[in-house]
Image (cartoon, rainbow, N blue to C red):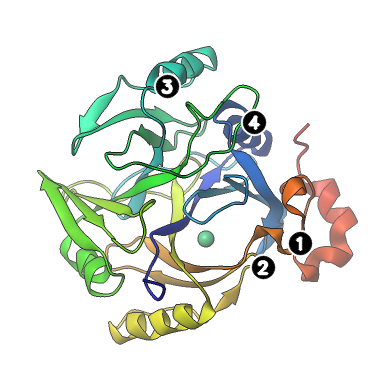
Amino acid sequence: MENKILGLHHITAIAADAKRNYDFYTKVLGLRMVKKTVNFDDPGTYHFYFGDEKGTPGTILTFFPWEGIGPGRTGVGMATDIGYSVPENSFAFWADRFKKFNIKYSEPAERFGEQYLSFRDPDGLNIDLIVSNTEDIRKSWETEEVKADAAIKGFHSVTLTLKSVNATAEILTGVLGYKLLKQDGNRYRFITDAIESAAIVDIIELPQSPSGYNAAGTNHHIAFRVKDDDILMDYREKIAAKGLSITPKIDRDYFFSLYFREPGGVLFELATDNPGFTKDEPLNELGTNLKLPKQYEPSRAEIEKVLPSLG
Ligand code: ZN
């Protein structure tokens, strides 16, 4: 199993207001901010990472909060829904909480035999809370207001909306080790047995729908998890052999990455477990200090002046 794709590593989305984004994910949803850094290509913008205590791969949702960016449009060629795994019997808690904070949500429904409750974050990003059919033993991060009996455990799944399922399915099954589990109408569920959680990718096929537009409230890319850089580079060859262009290995400080655009248009990344978020902060301080990649450390004072206040 060790040389396989181990489900999702992280998902990255776009927000329009850093403080609002930070407050929503840490306070309303009760996730831990595991790293506060900047966009490595645009150091005047934050890069937030929200997850469990350690920022375990499969729990990490990251954001680029570009102040004042306009709304995007969720549509074809994108990851359109994030699925979070929550404990059984937690929907009443979440519905009350969403009411209290004025968050739009839908009544619980069922898909592939699993109950889910959908809501939108303050930028309009689609998120489902899902009670998994299989036991999710992951330990969630707890806050004063969101305790283990309701807290988010990490990803359950991600949904891609595509014009056509076939070419992307070929990458998922032919390269990344997923198999088709079920189909219901135009929704196809793929799963890997290499790991027990964050193991599902759903594809919705919508041939006639308009393309999405990437800005606030939309997902930028999804990253799949591999154990280390040797395995990462093995996958680089396999993906290149399918005729897809793929980046060289990129050092993201907390993991190593490769990026490629899958045939359906979604930006895919492969990311390693090593070195992880405790590389530059002890576990009990994760997310509390602004961490900069070393090329920006000399400009720290100017960067701190430009970044919006989260207080
Ligand atoms: Zn990424």
Determine the residue positioned at 65% across, 64% down: 41
Q: Residues within 10 Å of mark 2 (few under 14, many from 20)?
A: some
**Label 2 to label 1: alpha-carbon separation:** 9 Å
**Label 3 to label 1: alpha-carbon separation:** 37 Å
Mark 2, secondary structure of its residue: loop
Q: In front: mark 2 or mark 1?
A: 1
**N-terminal label among 3 and 1:** 3
What's under tag 4, amino acid-wise? Asp
**N-terminal label among 1 and 4:** 4
Quarter of the image for residue 251 reads bottom right
Residue bearing mark 2: 253
Q: Is residue 288 left or right of residue 255?
A: right
In the rendered image, the quadrant that contains the N terminus is bottom left
Q: Are marks 2 and 4 in contact (CB under 8 Å)?
A: no
**Label 4 to label 3: alpha-carbon separation:** 16 Å
**N-terminal label among 2 and 1:** 2
Q: Residues within 10 Å of mark 4 (few under 14, many from 20)?
A: some
What's under tag 2, amino acid-wise? Asp
The answer to whether residue 109 is visible is yes
Q: Position of residue 9 (x, y in %)?
A: 47, 59
Residue bearing mark 3: 104
Q: Are marks 2 and 1 in contact (CB under 8 Å)?
A: yes
Q: Residues within 10 Å of mark 3 (few under 14, many from 20)?
A: some
Q: Are marks 1 and 4 in contact (CB under 8 Å)?
A: no
Q: Which mark is residue 280?
A: 1
Residue bearing mark 4: 23
What's under tag 3, amino acid-wise? Lys
What's under tag 1, amino acid-wise? Asp
